[in-house]
Image (cartoon, grey):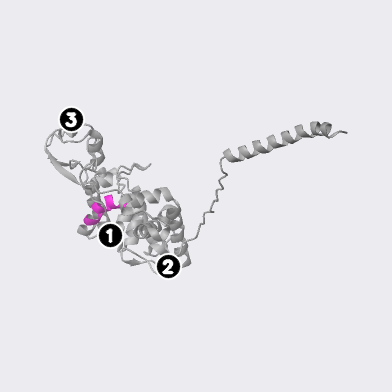
Amino acid sequence: MSKKRIWKIVLPGIIIIKIIVIIGLLNAAFKEPEVKIIKEAAIYKGMILPDSLTFAGERVPLENFDIRESLERELLVNSYFHSQTIRFIKLAPRYFSIIEPILKEKGIPDDFKYLAVAESNLDPKAVSPASAVGMWQFLKVTAREYGLEVASEVDERYHLEKSTYAACDYLKSAYDKFGSWALVSAAYNAGRTFTVRQITRQKTNNYFDMLLGEETARYVFRILALKMVLENPEDYGFDIPNDQKYPIIPTQDIEIKGPVNDFADFAQEHGTNYKILKMFNPWLRENYLTNNTGKTYVIKIPVHGARNGSIDTIQE
């Protein structure tokens, strides 16, 4: 076979191979680089419990296995319920700044601010299935017993300052009866009558030695877990800088001693809007106030510029 004939046969193949190689090189040049995503496996750990712990100045018997396991259960729940616990950390400065001075004034241990967290998840508008209301979750009868106004237009269970004072009076009365802050907390959850019945039945007045229904049995441990996480969030994996916590909004007080026909108009007259007025005064249950008795009410309004940051808010 002549060389000329061989080249006629081989040359088209060589050309095809070159074309394939060139196309391959072009595809490689324009192909997006492959990104390898290395996923780090999440590591979940048990809780390292402290050697000692107190609640409201009373020692928690951590040497007992049942106490340690009960505490660890609540620590696990609150440490791994990330979204809720982060929100608690962010909200705490705003509401604790109001609650703490009142507890101190009334002689109630500071640890009871964590009871408010356990009760309402730091929501001053919280309403339970049993119709307990507000940050301290007062039932209507108990609220009135401790001096709160509960009516169609005004419900002071939603009033953070007034309901905190009422809660302090309740807690002090319960302590006079039980002589133990842990039992006071149990009674706050289950009721004083139930607590007295269980003390008599079980022949002990030590909360940590009592057999109680699940909710009440877990209640003090939940408060303790909240205390531990909120006091030292970094120890439980939460890194929330102060500038990410919700600021304390400065307010001004406006006294009213008569009726208000329309709180939307009232809000605009005072440089805010209906939404913000109700946010800071959730105890106002209607868009008007009859106030036939001429009672004095104090309405809180954010100072001018506090909402949009044109003045400094307080960050703790």
Q: Distance between the residues labelled 1 and 2?
A: 21 Å
Between residue 80 and residue 115, name the one nearer to us: 80
Q: How many labels does the image show?
A: 3
In the rendered view, does 309 fall on the left or right side of 218?
left
Identity of the residue drawn at 24% across and 53% down: 97
The type of residue carrying mark 3 is: Asp
Whether label 1 touches label 3, CB < 8 Å? no
Q: Distance between the residues labelled 1 and 3?
A: 40 Å
Q: Nearer the viewer, mark 1 or mark 3?
A: 3
Which quarter of the figure is the C terminus placed in? bottom left
Write down the region rendered in magenta.
92-101
- Where does label 2 land, which residue? 62
- Where does label 1 land, which residue? 110
The type of residue carrying mark 2 is: Leu
For mark 3, give the secondary structure.
Answer: helix
Between residue 263 and residue 286, name the one nearer to us: 263
In the rendered view, does 224 fall on the left or right side of 150?
right
In reply to whether residue 99 is colored magenta, the answer given is: yes
The type of residue carrying mark 1 is: Asp
| Dot 1 alpha-carbon crowd within 10 angstroms: few under 14, some 14 to 19, many 20 or more | some
- Where does label 3 land, which residue? 265
Q: In which quarter of the image is residue 128?
A: top left
Mark 1 or 3, nearer chain start: 1
Q: Is residue 313 visible?
A: yes
Q: Is residue 289 visible?
A: no
Give x and y (percent) for residue 44.
51, 57
Whether 58 is drawn above or below 33: the answer is: below
Whether label 2 touches label 3, CB < 8 Å? no
Point out the residue furthest to the right here: 1
- For residue 53, which numbered disc appears in the image? none
